[in-house]
Image (spheres, grey):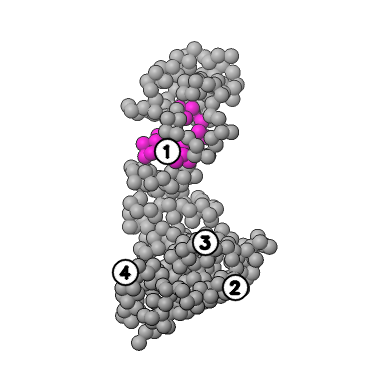
Amino acid sequence: MELSPEDALRLNVMLANHPQAIRIDESRMLVCALSEKGEMKISLNPNCRDEQYLKQIREMLSMHALDSPSGYPRHIWSRMAHLNSDSLEALLLLGDPEAVVAIAHSSELTDELARKAWWALEDADNARQMLRQPAVVAGRMGPVLAEYLVEFLPFETEGEKIMDTVRLVLQPGLLDAAVIQQLWRRGRRKNLFYVGFLATLPDALPDIPPISKRQQSLVDDLREVAASGNELAGLLARVMSAPGQAWLTTLQKVMEKPATQDVVNCSLEVAAAYFSSARPEGFADATLEELREEAVQWLRHPGNALVRQILDLDNGLDQALLALRVLSGSGYGMVRPVFGKSDAIGTLMRRKLQSVMGPYMEYMAQLGPVNRP
């Protein structure tokens, strides 16, 4: 069965005007097109069942865009970012939500393509995916997507998506200071909000308290050592500085009362990235006990020139260095003995984790305020 004559005519006119993107509103039986002049809407007049009629519409759009009535090849491209820039423009004309999802996941996504894809399908998952692309973050669409995600946050129920959203919208240039402060205050009720801050703004958290003059003196001395090429001294100076102490305090707030396993795992990943300069060989996958044993050997190794240089400056920093090395191994390996046997959350999870989190918090405390003569 063919399309009704009036629909066929209007759709051909619409396609002849070179639309930038097309979407189909199935509930209202509308075909909408985006062009340089604005939007165009066609009210459909089906001559058969709506589902069958929409199938014919999509076949017509696919023939126009891809020279094939089969539509979007999900089995080849689905969310795999294997699309080149030439394909993306064509996929925008299919009126197919899955095609828009593929565009959002493409490594070839540009700010202009993001604008068209967002018109075609406003969706929180798409917004998050597009904000992973530097071109979108730096473009006009970055703030638009960030604003949408912040407004959508009260309706987000999955902790992992909340943490990911906060991390993405805090990228430079997307939100104004007032909105950032609002997100920070929400962390008082839901500490998983803090995880996004720890990941994206590790050295620029809101409300950073000052440190003592003695501690600042240590930081200054460590920075002098770091200037000679000692990255380990640079990391220790970072941690001991006012922003570093605020970062540690915030991580402690998260680890004291995590709500789910996702919060714990994400926090450990963020910690591993923060302390990564103390483990240049890459991330570890080990228990806390294994990490401590390895860290002791690392600290005592006579060939560890970076450690020796720091201890020559202040021999009392040995425990801080040990803590740096252990915390740089943060990851799932630490909690596998617990999470590998239980899917508990909340209070029960925290009780089961106490044997890990107790010592872990003690290592963080080793990096707290120092008493320097």
Q: Nearer the viewer, mark 4 or mark 3?
A: 4
Does residue 169 belong to the magenta stretch? Answer: no
Q: Circle 2 is placed at which residue position?
A: 289
Left or right relative to 138: residue 153 = right
In the structure shown, which secondary structural element does the residue marked by tag 4 occupy? loop
Numbered tag placed on residue 283 in the rendering: 3
Residue 156: x and y in percent read 51, 51
**Nearest the eye: 85 or 102:** 85
| Residue depicted at 41% across the width and 45% down the height | 133
- The 10 Å Cα crowd at callout 3, few under 14, some 14 to 19, many 20 or more, is some
Numbered tag placed on residue 227 in the rendering: 4
Left or right relative to 297: residue 336 = right
In the structure shown, which secondary structural element does the residue marked by tag 1 occupy? loop
Above or below, 27 relative to 323: above
Q: Nearer the viewer, mark 1 or mark 3?
A: 3
Q: Which residue is the extreme one toward the right? A: 341
In the structure shown, which secondary structural element does the residue marked by tag 3 occupy? loop
Q: Who comes first in sequence, dot 2 or dot 4?
A: 4
Q: Which residues are magenta?
A: 91-116
